[in-house]
Image (cartoon, grey):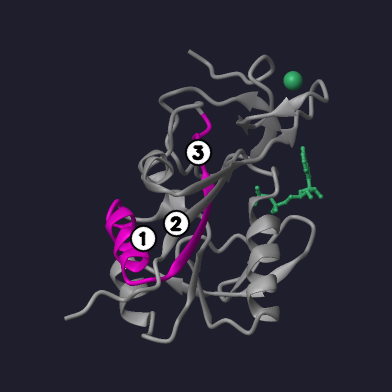
């Protein structure tokens, strides 16, 4: 088989919560639509933050997306004529998202991902670091630290008003949980 002459690539948008990843992904996908290029947009099914069938940014922008459980489903749902593949909340996907993104780019697609680069502890988050290493383009966005107003690179997790600790489970039953954007200096993890 001949190699498709058009070459694809991977773009990834990263940063903490509230830095504008979804906004930026939606902006790029809107421009894709204006150019009348064929796009497919996906998000992990477990993220039902706002809407199961849309990506919704914190300022209310939205774009339709298909909620999928596994990266395989993305590969199955991308067609020959699909030119652009958008993927939000990349950190929540199975590690095979890395292979899926590479395969799509090899097939000539423009793959645009968005995701958290760090978890609430400040550690690299799931498959995102590897996706960053393999991407042709990276955009690292900053939020605003809600404590001091400096650029925020981290996501603070608060449980009943207290900084979460390293060992806290991802899901805390019956606790009031809040996430906010903070800078390196103001970010706290209980030891
Ligand atoms: P992300 O996908 O990175 O979580 P969104 O694109 O959903 O971010 O939301 C970005 C928007 O969130 C900003 O344009 C702004 O209106 C709002 N926002 C709320 N809190 C903050 C904050 N601390 N820093 C920056 N933007 C914030
Ligand atoms: Zn700060």
Q: Nearer the viewer, residue 172 or 144?
A: 144
Residue for point 43% across, 60% down: 9
Mark 1 — residue?
101
Frontmost of labels 1 and 3 is 1
157 relative position to 107: left or right? right
Mark 3 — residue?
117
Residue 88: tell me if it is visible: yes
Q: In 3D space, how far apart are the residues under numbered discs 1 and 2 (Cα atoms)? A: 7 Å
User: 10 Å neighbourhood of mark 1: few (<14), some, or many (≥20)?
Assistant: many
Query: Residue 58 at x, y = what percent?
Result: 74, 55
Magenta residues span 95-120
Residue for point 31% across, 76% down: 4
Q: In 3D space, how far apart are the residues under numbered discs 2 and 3 (Cα atoms)? A: 16 Å
Circles 2 and 3: CB atoms closer than 8 Å: no
Q: Which mark is residue 10?
A: 2
Q: In 3D space, how far apart are the residues under numbered discs 1 and 3 (Cα atoms)? A: 17 Å
The disc, 2 or 3, on the residue closer to the chain's N-terminal end is 2
């Amino acid at each position: 088989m001949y190699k498709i002459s058009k070459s694809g690539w991977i773009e990834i948008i990263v940063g903490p919560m509230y830095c504008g990843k979804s906004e930026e992904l939606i902006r790029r996908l809107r421009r894709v639509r204006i150019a009348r290029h064929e796009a497919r947009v996906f998000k992990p099914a477990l993220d039902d933050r706002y809407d199961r069938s849309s990506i919704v940014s914190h300022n209310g922008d939205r774009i339709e997306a298909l909620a999928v459980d596994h990266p395989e489903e993305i590969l199955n749902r991308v067609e020959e004529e699909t030119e652009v593949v958008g993927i939000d909340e990349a950190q929540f996907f199975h590690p095979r998202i890395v292979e899926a993104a590479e395969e799509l780019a090899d097939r000539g697609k423009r793959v645009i991902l968005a995701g958290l680069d760090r978890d609430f502890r400040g550690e690299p988050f799931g498959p995102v670091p590897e996706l960053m290493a393999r991407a042709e383009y990276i955009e690292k966005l900053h939020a605003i630290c809600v404590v001091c107003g400096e650029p925020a690179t981290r996501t603070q997790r608060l449980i009943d008003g207290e900084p979460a600790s390293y060992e806290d489970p991802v899901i805390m039953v019956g606790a009031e949980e809040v996430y906010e954007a903070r800078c390196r200096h103001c970010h706290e993890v209980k030891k």
